[in-house]
Image (cartoon, helix red, strand yellow):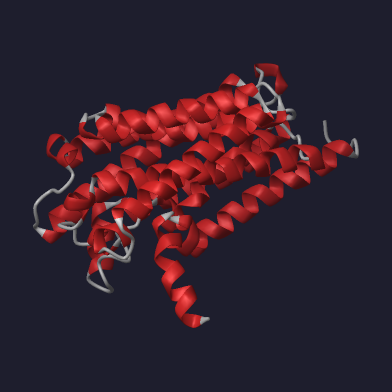
Amino acid sequence: MIAKKTAVAPYIMALRPHQWTKNLVVFAAALFSFHLDGQALLSSLFAFALFCGISSSFYLFNDITDVESDRRHPVKCKRPIASGAVSVPAATIMAIALFGGTVVLGLLHSMPLGATLLAYAALQFAYNKRLKRAPILDIFAIAGGFILRAWAGAAAIGITLSPWFLLGVAMLALFLGVEKRKAELRWYELQGGKKTRAVLKRYSMELLLRLENTVTTGAIMSYALWSSGPQVKGAPTPWMMVTLPFVLYGIFRYQLLSDPKEICWRAGTDKLESHIRTERPEDILLSDFPMQLTLIGWVTTIILILSLQNQGIVQ
């Protein structure tokens, strides 16, 4: 029994289940439109599962395509395909099965959801083939994946999203894309090694910091406008402004963890790899306790406001 589990483990890890936390954005449409009934949650859960499947299929495709460069990377060489724990033919079969299955299920659920999955697939294909080597466009492609996840959540439950909400998701997604490149660039600077990701040769820390300032301001302002309430075609209630401090702290905390001086300080107190985490937002969510508390407080406050609104206590 133990041997069997050990043999299956590399195939599960090749799907990168730790990155499925990115797909939680699918639930944002139901949460922020206050559609938290059973049917909406089930539909959102279904869309979440489909995005886990299709995103894993592209993680497999990406690892198959980049297998040689990953073997030269100090961290990515440990991935199941790069290390040889999962063969390329087996990974190819898994990727095709996941991709085909999720698209078919999405189309059977609804045309909008199926179309969103196909749009995500087209974006991922373009990213893996060209966009990940194109400066600026690579960040837009990363952000586009998050926007399509939010759109899929809306498509699954059949609602129209607020333009301010979509803009907020876009700005926050761009923020995460910039932070990813910042972390990667800082990793190679600290290691003094060769930049295995070609696009990093076109970036400097100064440029990325300027981009970060722009998208951070955009994310905060768009969320603030959305939370102002229905007067600006935003949240169902202006009481959502109460959640703004959680968003501010979360963004500022993320910036602290990605700051070059903070990384250098932490690198001197512990293993470097454990702190170059803003390359992978899912690692922040899974390992940083203050961020976890912020997320819990944010979601709890939203649910509390919804409950009070349903009881007629707040408008």
Residue drawn at the location 71% of the way across and 30% of the way down = 157
- Residue 209 percent location from the top left of the image: 26, 38
Give percent across and percent down for residue 195.
13, 48
Q: Residue at x 70, y 18 (%)?
A: 231
| Image x and y of residue 132, in percent | 26, 35
Hey, which quadrant is residue 73 in on the image?
Answer: bottom left
Q: Position of residue 237 (x, y in %)?
A: 74, 30
The residue shown at (9%, 58%) is 192
User: Would residue 117 be seen by someone viewing this image from the given angle?
Assistant: yes
Q: Is residue 214 shown to the viewer in this render?
A: no
64 lies above or below 292: above
Dividing the image into 4 quarters, which one contains the C terminus?
A: top right
Q: Is residue 67 above or below residue 79?
A: above
Task: Specify the quadrant of the image occupied by residue 110.
Answer: top right
Q: Is residue 226 left or right of residue 266?
A: right
- Is residue 170 positioned above or below 288 on the image? above
Relative placement, left or right, of 259 versus 307 is: left
Work out whether residue 129 or residue 161 is closer to the camera in this orientation and state it.
129
Residue at (43% x, 41% y) in the render: 96
Relative to 288, 103 lies left or right:
right
Farthest residue, direction right: 311
* Between 112 and 308, the one nearer to me in the picture: 112
User: What count of labels does the image hold?
Assistant: 0
